[in-house]
Image (cartoon, rainbow, N blue to C red):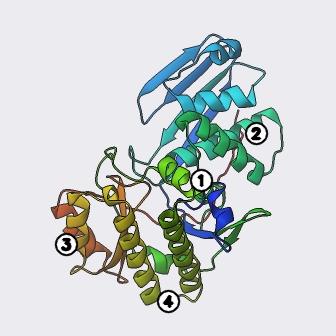
């Protein structure tokens, strides 16, 4: 909802009181990890329809590129003592910008942690997952994407010199459910926010970028307070401010389709909207008048976008042990 990009270390250290605000939705990522009687490592993805097989852990480690890099890198790190078959599935569409890969990383790390009997706490698993994902995408990653999968609910993630702290925001989930519409516009092109370029400019002392992040931090802090009350008028105003600010500073974050969706959703009952993730496509989150969801969804679908039915996910990751 607010505070994206500032959660990349060390950017938040330059903006006292930095916080991000997000909520978990019931578009799940899952994995099944099965021990094998041989040494093979078999990686399968149900949503991608692919499979990758290695004769052993050593063979996987000797490979430089992977067709399924998230699962492969997780296996490299956790180093199981047996062969494994890992089957993954993500309900997030390609390039949706709703942290599908981060949720999958938390699922994989939690399952492998249980398999190995490591008993690492969930915050340590977040650190491991974030570092592994950075190895996959080859640029620094932010921390906030992992917290919905870790805890569920609505969160304020405080970014401080002493570390990262997640604080739940007490809110009526059903009330929020009545105010949310999520639209998928398709996989993004390459012209959204380039976090690495923004990060380099900030560290290099670009004053305009620094002012940009001051504004991002201010909006996120105010958004947290608005949700805690809750004040939906103020929440909508801040969401509009956040979107206008990001559009001005990164014009590639929007597309003609996204602009059209925002325009047609307003008379149907949308109060505010913003792109999820880096933009240039992916998902658009609409905050709507309570009960206006069906009207807004119909207006969006008439323009050719796909509405994804979502609700707040009240709980985070769960691990079950079977036969």
Considering depth in this image, is 269 or 39 the residue closer to the camera? 269
The residue that disc 3 covers is 264
| Residue picked out by circle 2 | 113
Mark 4 or mark 3, which has the lower sequence index? 4
**Residue 20 is drawn in which quadrant?**
bottom right
In this rendering, the label closer to the viewer, 1 or 2: 1
Q: Could you say which quadrant of the image residue 294 lies in?
A: bottom left
At x 67% / y 28%, what residue is drawn? Answer: 75
- For the residues labelled 4 and 2, the Cα–Cα distance comes to 40 Å
- Looking at marks 1 and 2 on the same chain, the residue that comes earlier in the sequence is marked by 2
Q: Is residue 287 left or right of residue 312?
A: left
The disc placed on residue 231 is 4
Q: CA distance from mark 2 to mark 3?
A: 47 Å
Quick check: 301 above or below 36?
Answer: below
Label 1 close to label 2 by CB (< 8 Å): no
Residue 49: image quadrant is top left
Q: Earlier in the sequence, mark 4 or mark 2?
A: 2
Q: Mark 1 or mark 3, which has the lower sequence index?
A: 1
Q: Is residue 217 above or below residue 102?
A: below
**Circle 2 sits in a helix, a strand or a loop, which is it?**
helix
- 2 or 3: mark nearer the eye: 3
**Residue 311, numbered circle:** none
Can residue 285 be seen at all in this image of the molecule? no
What residue did someone put label 1 on? 142
Query: For numbered disc 3, what is the local secondary structure?
Result: helix
Taking the image as shown, residue 226 lies to the left or right of residue 302, namely: right
């Amino acid at each position: 909802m607010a505070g994206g990009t500032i959660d990349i270390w060390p950017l938040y250290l330059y903006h006292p009181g930095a916080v991000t605000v997000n909520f978990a939705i019931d578009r799940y990522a899952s994995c099944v990890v099965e021990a094998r009687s041989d040494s093979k490592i078999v990686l399968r993805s149900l949503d991608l329809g692919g499979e990758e097989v290695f004769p052993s852990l050593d063979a996987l480690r000797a490979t430089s590129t992977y067709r399924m890099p998230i699962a492969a890198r997780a296996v490299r790190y956790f180093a199981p003592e047996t062969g494994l078959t890992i089957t993954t599935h993500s309900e997030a569409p390609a390039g949706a910008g709703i942290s599908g890969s981060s949720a999958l990383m938390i699922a994989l790390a939690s399952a492998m942690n249980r398999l190995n009997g490591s008993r690492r706490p969930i915050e340590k698993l977040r650190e491991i997952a974030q570092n592994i994902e950075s190895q996959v995408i080859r640029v620094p990653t932010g921390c906030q994407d992992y917290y919905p999968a870790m805890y569920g609910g609505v969160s304020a993630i405080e970014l401080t010199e002493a570390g990262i702290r997640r604080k739940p925001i007490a809110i009526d989930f059903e009330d929020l459910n009545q105010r949310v519409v999520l639209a998928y516009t398709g996989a993004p092109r390459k012209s959204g926010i380039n976090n690495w370029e923004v990060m380099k400019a900030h560290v290099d002392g670009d004053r305009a970028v620094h002012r940009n992040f001051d504004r991002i931090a201010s909006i996120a802090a105010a958004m947290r307070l608005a949700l805690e009350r809750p004040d939906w008028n103020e929440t909508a105003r801040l969401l509009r401010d956040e979107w206008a600010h990001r559009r001005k500073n990164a014009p590639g974050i929007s597309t003609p389709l996204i602009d059209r969706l925002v325009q047609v959703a307003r008379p149907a009952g949308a109060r505010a909207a913003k792109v999820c993730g880096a933009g240039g496509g992916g998902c658009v989150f609409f905050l709507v008048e309570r009960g206006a969801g069906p009207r807004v969804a119909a207006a969006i679908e008439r323009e050719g976008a796909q509405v994804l039915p979502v609700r707040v996910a009240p709980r985070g990751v769960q691990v079950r042990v079977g036969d």
